Image: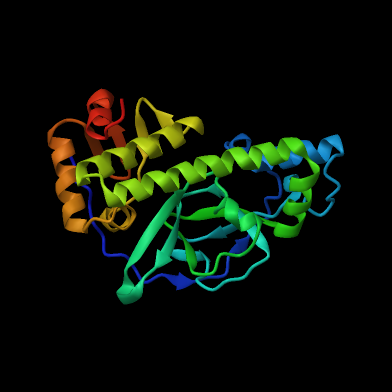
Amino acid sequence: MNKLVEKKPAHTHPARPTATSERSCTVCAVEEFNFCAAVGVALKTGTGDVPCLLPLGAVAQKISARRIICHLNERSESVPVICQGWAALTIALPGGRRQILSFLLPGDTVSMAYLFGPMPGRIVDAITDVTFRSFKRYDLQTLLFKDADFFETVMKAWVEEEERSVQLTVDLGRRTADERLARLILTLAGRLTKRGMMRDLSMEFPLRQHHIADATGLTPVHVSKVIGEFQRADLIEINNRSLTIVDLVALRRVGGIY
């Protein structure tokens, strides 16, 4: 079994996203899991009179791994939605430290809070190569208060985001290292399953020790130790950029999920 290989992160440079010629969301495998689908329904039914939103014509933008999508003090009037790839929403701390607030998967809005204003102090950086689309905040707000179904979709997504935030607080304050790692894996597995991105309990896993450490409040050395213990106990297997849950029941037990 391969251990989680740690690579020293390259310096993250600001980068200008590259627009692509692909203008259609019809090929998106996860569109139904974000508010893009709700926007489309609202526009088609005529309840959302926001002609410039047009999700089916939004231009995709691509950015390379380890590049910044949203900068520290950015006050953009747009709301990015991840189409492909993995990204992280983080808070930068003195001395190069950071806390990852959430991992962003295909179909995720950077944060539902972005619908109501920019979030200075946050950084969104690409873990893998990322494709994303951006919508104007004002247009989304207009649609939000005009269309009840879209409002409900946004509120459900916000509740899910808030629940992950609450669990992160408990992780950092009270849970053990084993519990934090097990719950992180299980949470990602659950989110990927909803998107149809899990196969036989196997998932893409581009995270490295420093990503997991920054998300769980542990050191990379401690992360390596716990991951090694999980593999020796036949709870998980990690090969290259994939992770397989070998014993789901036992892993849930370790994470305190019954």
Judge from the rendering whether residue 122 lies leftward or rightward of residue 53; answer left or right: left
Q: Residue, x 36% and y 50% (percent of image)?
A: 169
Res 26 visible: no
Residue 10 appears in which quarter of the rendering? bottom left
136 shown above or below 36: below
Residue 188 location (% of width, % of height): 39, 39
The correct choice, above or below, for 196 with respect to 77 in the image is above
Q: What quarter of the picture does the N terminus occupy?
A: top left
Q: In which quarter of the view is residue 150 placed?
A: top right
From the viewer's side, name the closer residue of 256 and 19: 256
Judge from the rendering whether residue 15 lies leftward or rightward of residue 227; answer left or right: right
User: x and y percent of residue 224 in the render?
Assistant: 18, 50
- Residue 106 location in percent, x, y? 52, 44
| Residue 134 location (% of width, % of height) | 65, 56
Give the residue drawn at x 57%, y 41%. Answer: 157
Report the number of numbered marks: 0
Identify the colour scheme used.
Answer: rainbow
Residue, x 73% and y 42% (percent of image)? 39
Instruction: State left or right for residue 115 relative to residue 201.
Output: right
- Looking at the rendered image, the quarter that the C terminus falls into is top left
Between residues 125 and 183, which one lies in front from this camera angle? 183
- Residue 189 visible: yes
On screen, residue 27 versus residue 65, left or right, reads right
